[in-house]
Amino acid sequence: MRVLLINPPSGLYIREDRCQVPVEGLSATAVRPPLDLAYLAAVAREKGAIATIRDYPAAGADWDAYARDLADIKPSVLVVSVTTPTLAGDMDAVARAKAAGVALTIAKGAHFLTEAAKVLADNPALDIAIVGEYEESFADIITGMPLPEIAGIAWRENGAVRVNPMRGFIADLNALPFPARDLLDNDLYRRPDTGERQTTIQTNRGCPSNCIYCLAAPVSGRQLRLRSPENIVAELRECVEQHGIRNFFFRADTFTINKPWVMAVCSAIAGSGLDIAWVCNSRVDTLDEARLNMMKKAGCWLVSLGIEAGTEAGLQQIRKGTTLAQARAAVQLCRRIGIKTFCFYMVGLPWDDEASIAATAAFARELDSDFAEFHIAVPFLGMDLLDIVQREQLWQPGADGKYDHAHPAIRTRHLSAARVEQLRRRALLRFYLRPRYIVRTLRHAGPAQFSNYVKFGCATLKRLLLPD
C-alpha cells in the first residue's frame, strides 16, 4: 500500500486543526512542519505501508508538481490535511487524486467536527473524513477494518453518507510513534530570527479553558493529557542526533498549565545533555518564577501569551479567565528572568468598536512585549463565537469561506469588516514603528538576527502600508 499525505497547494497555512492561520499576512508566523501528517505517516509505516509526505505550499510547489507526484508515486491512499479557509482547494486536490486513479481518499481537520457529512455530500471524490483525533482511526482504516466498525469517521456507503460515533481521545500519548520526520524536507522549516532548522514537538493535548474563540477544547478535549518527560526527551534526542534539529516549538494548548509536569520535563531536558532552544504557548495565569527559571535552564527562550483584550470587560466577554494585572505581571516576570515574550491580541469581536480596539492596541504598547500579533477574530465551526455571529447576522457578505486571522469574515455591531482590517493594520504599525522598540530590538539582536529582523521589518511595513 502506498500512502501519499499532503498539504495541498491550496494556501500556505498552519494546518494544526486548532490553529488554522495563514503564514502570509501575519506579523511573525513561521512555516511549521506538518506534524499531523508525520504522525499519520509513522502510523502507516507501522502497519506496513509505504508513506510519502508532500508539503506543497511550504516548498513553493504548485498543482503541476502535485500531478507529477500522483503519476510517479501512484498512491493507493491519499490523506489531505484540511483547513476551513482552504476547504475548496483541498477538495480540489481530492478530486484530482480520484481522477488520477487513487483508490481511497481521506481528509482530516477540525472542519469535520461539525461538517463531515456536508463535505462528503458535496464532494463525491472524498471517501472518508476523520472526525476528531486521527491516529487510531487512521490505523483502523489502513489495516482494513470494516468502515462501519471504525469510530471517529464519516464515510460513504452506496452513495449515502454515514457518520460513525465519535472516538474517545487517546489516553496514552506515549504509545504513539514519533512523527516520521525523515519523510519531511526539514530544511523548509526555519526559526524566523536565526534561520536555523526548527521543528514542532507535541508535548501534551487538551485544554480545560473555556474561551469562546478557540478550537482547542473541541479538537483536543478539556482533559489534559501529558506525555512523560522521558518520552519527550527521547523524541528531542532523535531530532538532534538524526536530523540535526536543535530548535523547537513545543506544541501544546498551554504548555505551562501543570506545574509539576513542567518542572519534571524541564529538569529532564536540562539533565539530558542536549543543547537545544525552544518556545512554547502559555497563559498569563500559569507562570511563576520557579517555572520560568526552570524553563530557561532547559533552553526556553520565548513564551507566547494570549493576552487577547486590553480591557477587563473584553476579557470577561471572551471568557478568558485572566486579568490585565496578570498579563502585566507575566510579561514583566519573563523580562526579568530573560525570556522573550510574543503576545497575541484579538480584534473584530462582535462587540468591538473604535474605543475597545484602541484600548487593546494601547495595552499592547504598554506591555511592550518583544513581538506582538493582532488576530482578527474568526468564527470557526464548533466555537461559541460562531453562535453569536449567526444569531446577530454579522457575516460579511461574500466571505464564502475566504477568511482567516488577517482577513475578516464578520463585521462587528459597530464596525464594518473593512474598518476592522484598517484598525488591525494601525495597531501593528503603532506597535512595531515605535523608535524605542526598534532600537531595543536591533540592539539585542545577534548578527543573523539583525539581518532577519531588518528583512522582516521591511516586508511587514510594505504589507501593512500597501495591502492588497
Image: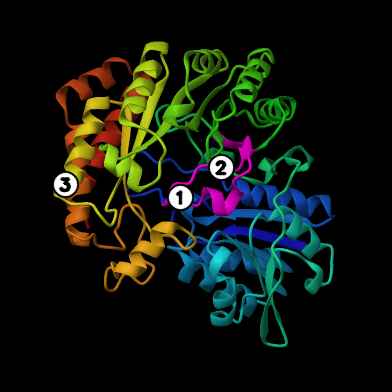
Q: Is residue 29 magenta?
A: no
Q: Which residues are magenta?
A: 198-224
Q: Residues within 10 Å of mark 2 (few under 14, many from 20)?
A: many
23 above or below 251? below
Q: Which is nearer the N-term, disc 3 or disc 2? A: 2
Which amino acid lies under the numbered mark 1 shown in the image of this protein?
A: Cys
Residue 296 vertical placement versus 320 (above, below): above
The tag on residue 290 is none
Q: Earlier in the sequence, mark 2 or mark 1?
A: 2
The amino acid beneath tag 3 is Leu
Q: Secondary structure at mark 2?
A: loop
Question: Which residue shows up at 39% across the image and 28% down it?
Answer: 193
Q: What residue type is disc 2 on?
A: Cys
Give the number of the mark in front: 3 or 1.
1
Q: Which residue is mark 2?
A: 207
Mark 3 = which residue? 465
- Label 3 to label 1, Cα distance in Å? 29 Å
Asked if marks 3 and 1 touch (Cβ < 8 Å), the reply is no
Q: Quadrant of the C terminus?
A: bottom left
Q: Position of residue 230 (x, y in %)?
A: 74, 25
Residue hosting label 1: 214
The residue that appears at 73% across and 40% down in the rendered structure is 173
Q: Tell me the crowding category of disc 1: few under 14, some 14 to 19, or many 20 or more residues within 10 angstroms, Cα based.
A: many
Who is closer to the viewer here, 177 or 239? 177
Q: Position of residue 158 (x, y in %)?
A: 72, 87
Q: Is residue 112 left or right of residue 394?
A: right
Q: CA distance from mark 2 to mark 1?
A: 10 Å
Q: Quadrant of residue 384?
A: bottom left
Res. 95 in view: no
- Look at 76% across and 37% down and name the residue there: 174
**Spot occupied by residue 252 in the image (x, y as percentages of width and height):** 56, 38
